[in-house]
Image (cartoon, grey):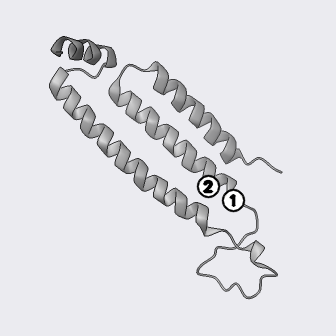
Amino acid sequence: MRVEPAEIIAVIMLFIGFYGLITTRNILKSTIFLIFMEVACIMFFLSIGYREGIAAPIGQNLEGLESFEMVADPFPQALMITAIVIGLSVTTIMLVMTITLIREFNSTDWDVIKTKAKHLE
């Protein structure tokens, strides 16, 4: 089994995003690193579904193929489209929450927001 370069890049991107997510104290940077991890996961799943010499399941004449094993499975692509939509929704909610926190606490630093939130209790 051959490892594709896209798979290696996706795993590296995932670890960079995870490292950035746990080390940053800025809300906006945390959001960006979370998006980075999401893109890495989508890229990884699409790259492991790729095989050399397979035909697309739609838009082509499939009668000349020896078997249906030579046709790409559309299920992983459909799942990744769903993952993209869900990721966009989560990102939107995170950005709205970030705007709300900035208006409330005048900061994008997690520690400052935690400190100010404790004083409100």
Query: Which residue occupies 31% across, 19% down?
Result: 109
Relative to 1, does residue 117 appear above or below in the rendering?
A: above
- Looking at the rendered structure, the secondary structure element under dot 1 is loop
Relative to 26, does residue 99 appear above or below in the rendering?
A: below
Amino acid carrying mark 1 in the image: Tyr
Quadrant of the image occupied by residue 11: top right
Give the side of residue 69 with respect to residue 107, left or right.
right
Give the side of residue 70 with respect to residue 105, left or right.
right
Residue behind mark 2:
46
Residue behind mark 1:
50
- Looking at the rendered structure, the secondary structure element under dot 2 is helix
Neighbour tally class for label 1: few under 14, some 14-19, many 20 plus, Cα within 10 Å = few
Query: Which residue occupies 76% across, 73% down?
Result: 70
Q: Closer to the camera, 48 or 8?
A: 48
- Say which quadrant the C terminus sits in: top left
Relative to 81, does residue 7 appear above or below in the rendering?
A: above
Amino acid carrying mark 2 in the image: Leu
Query: Which residue occupies 48% across, 22% down?
Result: 22
Q: Closer to the camera, 18 or 116?
A: 116
